[in-house]
Amino acid sequence: MTKRFYIETVGCQMNMLDSELIASGLLRLGYEPAISASKADVVLFNTCSVRQHAEDKVYSALGRLKHAKQHNPLKIIGVLGCMAQKDGPLIFRRAPHVDLVVGPSQLGQLPRLIEEVAAGAGPTIAVSSDRKAESHREARESFAPFNPARRAEARPVAHQAMVRVAFGCDKFCSYCIVPSVRGPEQSRRPEDIEEEVQLLARQARQRDVALEVTLLGQTVNSYRYRDGGRTFRLADLLARLNDVEGLARLKFVTNHPRHMTEDLIKAVRDLSRVTPYFHVPAQSGSDRMLRRMRRGYSSSQYREMLGRIHETVPGAAVTSDFIVGFCGETEAEFQRSVDLVREARFKNSFIFKYSPRPGTHAAARFEDDVPDEEKRRRNNELLAVQNAISEEDNQPLVGRTVEILVEGPSKTSLKHEATERATQLVGRTTCDRIVVFEGAGELIGRLVSVEIEKAAAFTLFGRTVTSATN
Ligand code: SAH
Ligand code: SF4
Ligand code: F3S
């Protein structure tokens, strides 16, 4: 009988991509996707450790499966990804009905490990060794990149694809768990990346859709690949990919402010497929907090970098992340983040309450002394300032015609399961702004011109003008 799998994913785009690649591997082996965890023979949680909340979500989802496992002991339950790497065998203690614990670098072994568990191997674990306890070379080997071949049918949509350009992170920001769970920074060969993008573009052409590729790295703009005497940086990679036939848009996330070099900003200006969109997290507007966070720049250096982006790429959209309530953050220091948001006028910001992560420098050295209530208040205040800016800055778009890559039905449309031909669609501008409009399903995956009629903080509303060619 055909075995069915179900993957639940939390965390960042790296995890979304890993889940897609896992699904790809299982489909190749003859597994089929299940519509829910209860209907699956293999239930996999691809997990995140970046904040406590992300971990709590997985542990409570695991708790809900306890009963199902008692009912059907043959059901295989796996915990994958960053929390698997961080918690390791502790997961079996906290959730004894889990069969498999697999870290991000061991995902290539997953199909084999599932077979072994099915054959009665008992609780099975595959994770990398502790990065801090290893030499650099050993750590690199232990955190081998998970990088299997792409399969068209495993991708949720043909018109959007994530492509990893670098694994891991070497920044060790004091609050962050990512370098310990994802391992050392390792950039992929430019030839391999191009080959992958070529393949994705061919698949998109076969399905007659435009392709948007998002290049992924924890600090994507520190991408660097040495080949003999030459060093390839992100700007070189963008130039190399820009001319791939069938590629409509090229994006890259996440940037570190220190690596926002002139050549990269100019590449965004000069390369026709690269979208004028920069996600460059600031984390704080206070210099003392930035030092404590070990971010490696001051607020004035961050502002200077923003100035260079706006000067070189007029109209570019810049987005940011902030952490509020970091260890010792005073009200006055928090207000420096408010100042920065007001001044920078980000297109949007993701704002997080500081969550201490065991094993990080900050958790060991500083007290988590801002009460949760106060973190929440700061989070709301900063978000309110940001949202008002987002709404204001969207208004000038009303009356303008913008090019949209149509992503799919809008949320409302999905809820009401519109069966008529015309439905509500959602797409994005080159600056990553979300646009909702009425249109037929055939437009999904195409570039379309839309005139904006109304603008809110997170969404623009418009109507199609003409269908552009892709
Ligand atoms: N590599 C990216 C993203 C890392 S995780 C980068 O460097 O920007 C995404 C975001 O989560 C971070 O930008 C940061 O704002 C937030 N974050 C990371 N660790 C956190 C922690 N311990 N508590 C709260 N937010 C955190
Ligand atoms: Fe974490 Fe800093 Fe690396 Fe981003 S750059 S993943 S915040 S350590
Ligand atoms: Fe989370 Fe791992 Fe991404 S900790 S943010 S899923 S790299």
Image (cartoon, rainbow, N blue to C red):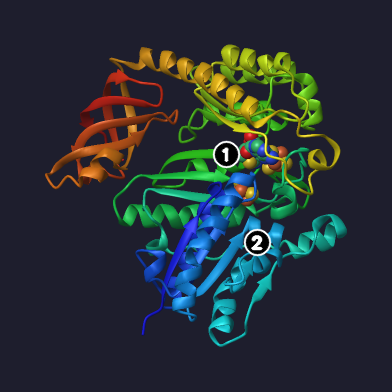
The quarter of the image holding the N terminus is bottom left
Query: What crowding class fits label 2: few (fewer than 14 Cα within 10 Å), some (14-19), or many (20 or more)?
Result: many
User: Which residue does the numbered mark 1 point to in the structure image?
Assistant: 253
The residue at label 1 has a CB less than 8 Å from ligand 1: no
Instruction: From this view, report whether residue 119 is shown above or below residue 185.
Output: below
Disc 2 designates what residue? 84
Disc 2 to disc 1, how far (Cα)? 24 Å
Per the image, label 2 sits on a secondary structure element best described as helix
- Does 36 sit above or below residue 343? below
Quadrant of picture, ligand 1: top right
Q: Position of residue 90 (x, y in %)?
A: 70, 64
Q: Position of residue 68 (x, y in %)?
A: 45, 71
Q: Nearer the viewer, residue 206 or 159?
A: 159
Q: Position of residue 4 (x, y in %)?
A: 40, 74
Residue that appears at 53% across and 23% down: 383
Amino acid type indicated by mark 1: Val
Mark 1 neighbour density, 10 Å: few (under 14) some (14–19) many (20 or more): some
Image quadrant where residue 268 sits: top right
Disc number placed over residue 214 in the picture, else none: none
Q: Residue at x 64, y 55 (%)?
A: 82
Sequence order check: which comes first, mark 2 or mark 1?
2
Q: Is residue 220 visible?
A: no
Which residue: 67% across, 72% down? 125
Left or right placement of residue 298 versus residue 157 in this view = right
Q: Is 418 drawn above or below residue 33 in the view shown? A: above
